[in-house]
Amino acid sequence: MLTPTFGRRRPGTDARYVVLGIPYDSSQTYRCGSRDAPAAIRAASAEMEDYDMLEGADLLSLDIADAGDVEVSHGSPAATARRVEEALSMLGEGAVPVMLGGEHTITAFAAAAVKPEALVALDAHLDFRDSYLENPHSHACTLRRAAEAVGCENLVVAGVRSACREELRSAERMGVRVFRFGVEARELAEELAESLRGRRVYLSIDMDFLDPKEARGVGNPEPPGYSYTEAVEVLEFLRHVKLAALDVTEVIPGIDAYTPVLAAKLVFKALLRAESLST
Ligand SMILES: [Mn+2]
């Protein structure tokens, strides 16, 4: 193969988990370049060995294929949303899409197509503005747009430590469940498992959920944050839900070469937990 596929897996759209890069980064507000993240995350994943000693699990037990990247239309959120929807419709029956952003905006596009029963976003920010810089498709609005597809009552945002007062008020008034940063990782995992047990859940990981001491290469770093180890602990809730889709967004490889490693690792860790469903 000329370029690395995710985890050196076969190219294709037929597998339990199908990786899809979405290199869209039209609205980034601070540090830019998440369009380079799918390639960087794939490169990091391809270097990982197959036996995860900390899990006692062989990553090759995960049935993963890599469908390549969606050809996005920079500057046109509507066209990109259609292209994401079209790409998702080409996946095999029952396949779980694993999307590599791109900025967080891709979550709104994908959630509208996946139509999960619930959306969990791990994020330092609320991303719940109705519009930002006159752009309703800004990455600062993505969970507001996603909520229009999945319902505010089915949206959970965890790890939040920065917002504007108005969006926080809107989120609370509209029934979004918000876990502020500071909730202990194990408690967060238990709360998520308890409230979402058995449901079809879309998990969106904005890498700024992590402490920027570890994940330095993100668009809008927001200290403090959860450690990588704590983030893995939060993923424990996936053992109790049905994973409908997964995305990892906001990685800026040009700033830091380690953040794509963390992103690739979190994908494997999430899928391992999704595999061991024990509702
Ligand atoms: Mn975000």
Image (cartoon, rainbow, N blue to C red):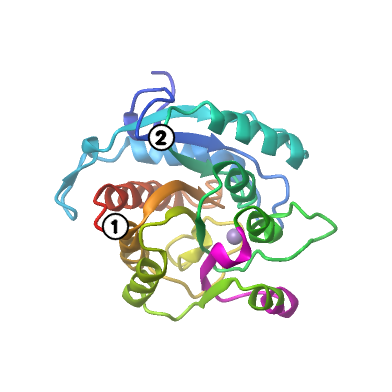
Q: Residue at x 85, y 58 (%)?
A: 134
Could you say where residue 224 lies in the image, as x and y percent from the top left? 49, 75
Res 224 seen here = yes
What secondary structure is marked by label 1? helix
| Residues drawn in magenta | 151-169
Q: Is residue 273 magenta?
A: no
Q: Are marks 2 and 1 in contact (CB under 8 Å)?
A: no
Instruction: In the displayed orientation, state which residue is furthest to the right.
Output: 134
Could you say where residue 248 lies in the image, as x and y percent from the top left? 49, 50
Q: Residue at x 51, y 38 (%)?
A: 38
Mark 2–mark 1 distance (CA, rounded to whole Å): 18 Å
Could you say where residue 95 lies in the image, as x and y percent from the top left? 41, 34
Residue 63 lies, with reference to residue 265, above or below; the image says above
Q: Nearer the viewer, residue 229 or 154?
A: 154
Classify residue 3 by image quadrant: top left
Location of ligand 1 given as a quarter of the image: bottom right
Instruction: State how many labels appear.
Output: 2
Q: Nearer the viewer, residue 225 or 198?
A: 198
- Residue under label 2: 94
Q: Indicate the amino acid at tag 2.
A: Gly
Q: Nearer the viewer, residue 107 or 260?
A: 107
Residue 103 lies, with reference to residue 224, above or below; the image says above
Q: Indicate the amino acid at tag 1.
A: Arg
Q: Which quadrant: the N terminus? A: top left
Res 30 seen here = no
Instruction: Say whether residue 264 is left or right of residue 163.
Output: left
Q: Residues within 10 Å of mark 2 (few under 14, many from 20)?
A: few
The answer to which of marks 2 and 1 sits earlier in the sequence is: 2
Q: Residues within 10 Å of mark 1 (few under 14, many from 20)?
A: many
- Residue under label 1: 239
